[in-house]
Image (cartoon, rainbow, N blue to C red):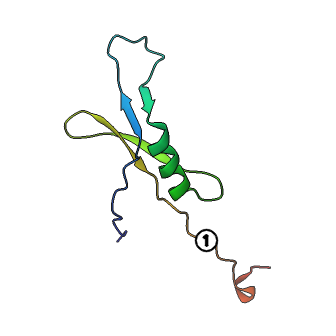
Amino acid sequence: MTEQKEKVFVDGLISKKNQNAPDFVVVNQSFKVEEFITFLKANAKNGWVNTQTKIAKSGKLYSELDTFEPKPKTAPKSNDLAF
């Protein structure tokens, strides 16, 4: 079973869907600079921060830190190679 991690919401970012916007505009985003920079610095890994924008049960958009980390690939044991 996968371990459920606690949600980490993105500080300083607001995403809103404008129903009157053209189809090619997905969302409007507003960044509160100081809060967003603090969030980025606190959550950067190798110079990157990954987030996901989701839809709450209420229908509002919110952004969450993407904490997915792929499992390291394990090398096959030398006696498992088929030759």
Where 20 falls versus 41 (above or below)? above
Residue 29 in the image: x percent, y percent? Answer: 43, 29
Which residue is most to the right? Answer: 83
Q: For the residue marked with disc 1, what is the amino acid? A: Pro
Which residue is most to the front? Answer: 34
| Residue at the (49%, 50%) spot, across then down | 38
Where 30 falls versus 23 (above or below)? below
Which quadrant of the figure has residue 62?
A: top left
Name the foreground residue: 1 vs 79.
Answer: 1
User: Taking 72 as reference, is 35 left or right?
Assistant: left
Which quadrant of the figure has residue 76?
A: bottom right
Where 25 falls versus 52 (above or below)? above
Q: Secondary structure at mark 1?
A: loop
Name the foreground residue: 69 vs 35.
Answer: 35
Where 51 falls versus 74 (above or below)? above
Residue 33 in the image: x percent, y percent? Answer: 49, 38
Name the foreground residue: 25 vs 36.
Answer: 36
Which residue is most to the left? Answer: 58
Within 10 Å of disc 1 (Cα), the crowding (few <14, some 14-19, many 20+) is: few
Name the foreground residue: 54 vs 74.
Answer: 54
User: Taking 81 as reference, is 11 left or right?
Assistant: left
| Residue at the (44%, 36%) spot, across then down | 32
Residue 50 in the image: x percent, y percent? Answer: 52, 49
- Residue that carries the numbered disc 1 in the rendered image: 72
User: Taking 3 as reference, is 56 left or right?
Assistant: left
Residue 70 in the image: x percent, y percent? Answer: 55, 63
| Residue at the (65%, 76%) spot, across then down | 74
The quarter of the rendered structure image containing the C terminus is: bottom right
